[in-house]
Amino acid sequence: MTIALRPFYLPIFGAAAVIAAGAGPSAFAESPELTKANLGMGARANCAAPADITRLDHSLTRTARRIAARQPLKIVAIGSSSTAGAGATSPAASYPSRLAVILQQRFPNVPITVLNQGANGEEACDMVARFDQAVIAENPDLVIWQIGTNTILRDNPLPPTTKLLQEGLTRLKSAGSDVILIDPQFAPKVLAKRDADNMVDLIATTAKAEHVGLFHRFAVMRHWRQVARIPFETFLANDELHMNDWSYDCVAQLLGNAIAESVNRSTQTATAVPAR
């Protein structure tokens, strides 16, 4: 596995990272940043969430087709600091980096590239403005778009987000990419804001109307805290907002499982023999 990274700064970074996973997962498996010791309390927590909040409702047609043909798969992850990896110990511990490893393990015969285009502090308008150069120019098979948190934190009005989401999704789908949305994190600084639940609902409604996948990060993290009784400090950085190595890895595992399930579902549907 080869890794090309820009300089990394703690505690927050916005550098793009390219993970070309075709060579297999060993380079990450032995990375010191991802050992159980560095995962801290998270090493003793169970990475899990109910299937009804991790399953993708819409098929990833292009992704499934590329994997079935064993053709190279390119994924672009765009978003704000929780895509860039703020709160992680290194770029290798961000969710896009971990997702590359997990998907390569699932599909060892497919060269997989994950491009991390997360940037600290961005809102929907900033991300959509970068789409042509940062996303569409890469000709991705799958785009994972994390959105909503900074709008909530700044108490900005929500209606513009609906229009921007629709505009952005139209452009991505017109480019032929599959799309998965990721909603905000369940964290004290987000929960303290009046529009947290409204933003989650807005993203869910838009994903359903636009027929794109949605990874319910907010619900997954709420499950960790309210059902599994995992303390916030186990899966959040000290700022009570950003995720940490354990939660980035767990989100990547659950998202990777969801992508694999969707791909398998699409493949089975495409190859099903009609009943006579």
Image (tube, grey):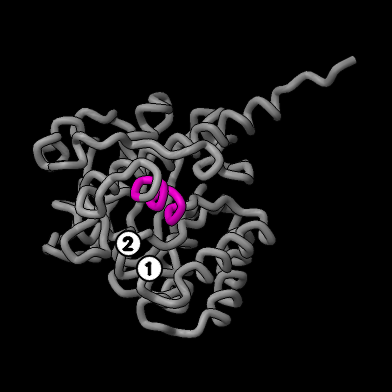
Q: Residue at x 16, y 42 (%)?
A: 41
Query: Could you tell me how far apart the alpha carbons at marks 1 and 2 are, in whole angstroms?
Result: 6 Å
The outermost residue toward the top is 276
Rendered image: mark on residue 98: none
Give the residue type that dot 1 points to.
Leu
Tag 1 residue: 191
The N terminus appears in which quarter of the rendering? top left
Tag 2 residue: 187
- On the image, the x and y values in percent for residue 213 come to 57, 50
Q: In this view, does 58 lie above or below 242?
A: above
Q: Is residue 227 above or below residue 108?
A: below
- On the image, the x and y values in percent for residue 2 come to 22, 40
Left or right for 6, reference 273: left
How busy is the neighbourhood of tag 1: few (under 14 within 10 Å), some, or many (20 plus)?
Answer: some
- On the image, the x and y values in percent for residue 264 come to 57, 28
Range shown magenta: 217-225
The outermost residue toward the right is 276
Secondary structure type for disc 2: loop
Check whether the beta carbons of the residues at disc 1 and disc 2 lie within 8 A of each other.
yes
Give the residue type that dot 2 points to.
Ala
- Whether residue 73 is in magenta: the answer is no
Q: Residue 151 occupies which quadrant of the picture?
A: bottom left
Q: Residue at x 34, y 67 (%)?
A: 80
